[in-house]
Amino acid sequence: MTIDPQSPLARGTAIVTGASSGIGQAYARRLAADGHNLVLVARRADRLRALAAELTGTHGGVRVETLGADLSDSEDLDRVVRRAAEDDIDVLVNNAGINGYGPFAETDPALLEKVLAVNVVAVTRLARAAVPGMLARGRGTVVNVASTLAFAGSLPPGPLPTRAVYGGTKGYVVTFSRTLAAELDASPVRVQVLCPGLTATEFHLTQGQESVSGDQARVHDDGGMPVEDVVTASLRALETGEVVCVPGLVDGAAVDRITEAETGLRASSAGTLAPRYRDPAQQ
Ligand SMILES: NC(=O)c1ccc[n+]([C@@H]2O[C@H](COP(=O)([O-])OP(=O)(O)OC[C@H]3O[C@@H](n4cnc5c(N)ncnc54)[C@H](OP(=O)(O)O)[C@@H]3O)[C@@H](O)[C@H]2O)c1
């Protein structure tokens, strides 16, 4: 797909977290093909350097920087935050994420903290760093990668055992992104939350404490959507202005129905105790 020169994605440098594999790597390839300069972020700096060499070799004129950083490390995050705040950044793809799957009561609290740091804190800090400059320059795009696991985690069918913290972090990303998109609606800065379902990446080969070893990108055996399709959906949704992009969702109106249901819940801010909570003796 060719990007419309008038679109918010049409110019500037893009910073992509988690660009050493999977969706982030595919996003970096697409943005480079569309002429963006890139800042690639992940722990595996060797893979980032290899991708940078590939992209500058393929797309003459595109500049690619690499930032080897562990986004759960506060000093590393500060370094990436400083780069995201520089005035050439027009696109932020907050893609890096880890799963930390495991029974809640047995999972190492340090791992759960890391899931929160990468999936929530880094996403928020990087957006906070990049958005003011985007507003000042009158253009910019933020894509935050969540998951379909943000939805219906507690409801049958298909509750999400071993995924409570991961689902919680992705719920944060959805609510954060939708609310920020509404706040910035009158501005030229676009915010999208990308919610892939099962995707063919390395994601399920590790809980996220450490990277998957080896230089070559590997893919889990459970199938899933190709990363290129996930990125195609995201780019298309940016063109059409969809805030919540769910690449595999055929019935796009389902997102509107969530909003309708939420509006019903919000109507409860009336200040009157609902009858079912009242003391039966006093009714
Ligand atoms: N695959 C799926 O089924 C699926 C479904 C829904 C949503 N998602 C979401 O999609 C996003 C991308 O995941 P993916 O599927 O492409 O998985 P992936 O291939 O495992 O990619 C994850 C990326 O995040 C980076 N990363 C992980 N921990 C990091 C840290 N502490 N600091 C910096 N970078 C870190 C990894 O690089 P290094 O290891 O080199 O740091 C890697 O580049 C995630 O937010 C994930 O939650 C995935």
Image: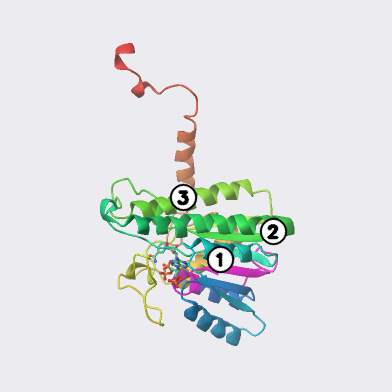
Measure the alpha-carbon separation of dots 2 and 1.
Answer: 22 Å
Residue 219 location (% of width, % of height)? 36, 75
* Mark toward the start of the polypeptide (3 vs 2): 2
Give 163 or 178, whichever is nearer the viewer.
163
Q: Residue at x 65, y 85 (%)?
A: 60
First in residue order: circle 2 vs circle 1: 2
Give the SS element for disc 1.
Answer: helix
Q: Secondary structure at mark 3?
A: helix
CA gap, disc 3 to disc 1? 22 Å
Image quarter for ligand 1: bottom left
Label 2 sits on residue: 133
Instruction: Name the residue located 64 percent from the left edge and 79 percent from the top edge.
Output: 63
- Numbered tag placed on residue 172 in the rendering: 3
Label 2 vs label 1, nearer the camera? 2
Residue type at mark 1?
Leu
Asked if residue 14 shows in the view, the reply is: yes
